[in-house]
Image (tube, rainbow, N blue to C red):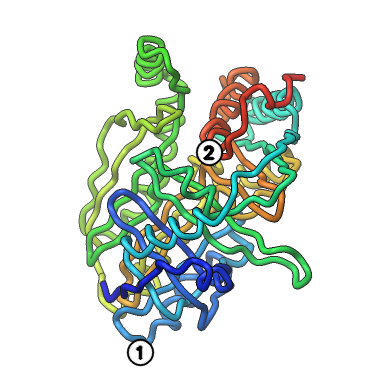
């Protein structure tokens, strides 16, 4: 893959340029990028062409690494690194940087909206869905601001997220104002938006969720209920169909399983479907439409994080959510000069800046959704990040 190895055993000398590092790491591989020699900041509709132009005449090992924001009209944040290192180097860097950082202390939490406020927003969404306006599903999110009396290291947090084998961990520097403290998107996502290797592509959307718990029998009962839930199966079907409809014109074959499988993370059960296909044109001439970055931009945001139809759902989100999503529910990943790469949905994440970590959690709302149940689902989805931050559940704001 053209990646390099280096000695990362001297953390004090590496710390100064930590802002120029981007990390993507899973149990199956990963990368660490170093330095920045170029940047792409164009919206989703222009991304495929911009990426193809960027890679024209580039060396085979050239990469772009970064993130797409939730808003398709906002600019992507893709960086061309000076060097890219393999998963072993990425793990070593993370170990070094996390080892320098102390655990944050003195936590205080503030949810926005409150659980009751979120339930009220869900009720408004259900009214829209039942009104026959053509909106079939909308995903609503809420946030939790966790503030520490001591600084929060993004590398420390990323290492704390290592316990779940089915996720991609990521640490990406975010654009900030010139006089602002550095900000990072840090998370561990279970959802593959799009991968490409040669002509072979795959997407594995997750939609429909239930909380896991320490009681094995109760957890398995929730999994069985999820698997049989007409509401969750319908929600999942919207996502799979939307992805298949977008990919089909670009593929000579596309395999879409008829029913989803259960996908487990440390804290949640999800319904997941692995879609696999073969591109009609995987050549250099086809990169404007078929690079991994172009395909990710085509699919994003899926009904799993936005709703359907996409434009109507995005309009409802803008009206009902009180905090801009930024890069939450966007996509994180990489693309190389051949068009290969992998992009994951930016979930289970926090925007880390100074002493504050802003957490996000969302739930898919359909016409028969229960506001109280959807609020409970978002509360459960906060748990992975709260545990990683070392925040006791008792600190979570009381329901109100």
Q: Residue furthest bottom?
A: 57
The residues tagged by marks 1 and 2 sit, at their Cα atoms, a distance apart of: 43 Å
Say which of 259 and 336 sits in front. 336
The numbered dot on residue 36 is none
Describe residue 149's horizontal placement relative to residue 134 as left or right: right
* Quadrant the N terminus occupies: bottom left
Which of the pair 336/149 is nearer the observer?
A: 149
Residue 371, by quadrant, is top right
Describe residue 276's horizontal placement relative to residue 387 as left or right: left
Q: Is residue 228 left or right of residue 213?
A: left
Residue 24 shows in the view: yes
Q: Residue at x 58, y 68 (%)?
A: 19
The residue indicated by pointer 2 is 388
Foreground residue, 177 or 321? 177
Q: Can you say which quadrant of the picture contains the C terminus? A: top right
Q: Position of residue 236 (x, y in %)?
A: 42, 33
For mark 1, what is the residue?
Answer: 57
Left or right? Give the position of 33 relative to 20: left
Please report the residue visible at 54 percent of the width from the left and 47 percent of the height from the top: 157
Q: Is residue 363 above or below residue 197?
A: above
């Amino acid at each position: 893959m053209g990646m390099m190895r280096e000695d990362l055993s001297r953390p004090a000398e590496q710390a100064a340029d930590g802002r120029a590092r981007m990390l993507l790491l899973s149990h199956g591989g990963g990368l660490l990028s170093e330095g920045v020699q170029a940047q792409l900041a164009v919206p989703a509709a222009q991304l495929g062409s911009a990426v193809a132009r960027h890679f024209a005449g580039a060396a085979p090992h050239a990469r772009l690494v970064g993130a797409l924001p939730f808003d398709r009209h906002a600019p992507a944040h893709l960086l061309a690194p000076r060097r890219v290192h393999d998963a072993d180097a990425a793990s070593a860097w993370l170990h070094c940087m996390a080892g320098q950082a102390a655990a944050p202390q003195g936590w205080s939490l503030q949810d926005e909206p409150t659980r009751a406020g979120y339930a009220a927003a869900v009720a408004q969404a259900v009214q829209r869905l039942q009104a026959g306006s053509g909106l079939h599903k909308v995903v609503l999110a809420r946030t939790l601001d966790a503030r520490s009396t001591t600084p929060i290291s993004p590398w420390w947090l990323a290492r704390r997220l290592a316990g779940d084998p089915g996720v991609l961990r990521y640490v990406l520097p975010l654009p900030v104002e010139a006089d602002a403290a550095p900000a990072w998107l840090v998370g561990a996502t279970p959802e593959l938006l799009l991968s490409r290797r040669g002509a072979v592509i795959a997407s594995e959307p997750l939609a429909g969720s239930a909380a896991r718990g320490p009681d094995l029998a109760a957890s398995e009962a929730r999994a069985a209920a999820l698997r049989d839930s007409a509401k969750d199966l319908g929600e999942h079907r919207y996502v799979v169909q939307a992805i298949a409809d977008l990919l089909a014109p670009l593929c000579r074959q596309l395999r879409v399983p008829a029913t989803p499988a259960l996908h487990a993370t440390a804290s949640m059960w999800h319904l997941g479907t692995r879609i696999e296909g073969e591109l009609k044109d995987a050549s250099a001439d086809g990169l404007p439409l078929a690079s991994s970055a172009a395909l990710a931009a085509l699919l994003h945001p899926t009904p799993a994080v936005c709703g359907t139809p996409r434009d109507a759902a995005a309009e409802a989100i803008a009206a009902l959510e009180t905090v801009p999503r930024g890069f939450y529910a966007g996509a994180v990943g990489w693309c190389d000069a051949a068009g290969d790469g992998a992009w994951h949905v930016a979930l289970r994440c926090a925007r880390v800046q100074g002493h504050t970590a802003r957490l996000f959690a969302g739930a898919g709302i359909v016409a028969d959704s229960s506001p109280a149940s959807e609020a409970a689902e978002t509360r459960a989805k906060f748990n992975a990040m709260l545990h990683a931050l070392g925040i006791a559940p008792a600190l979570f704001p009381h329901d109100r």
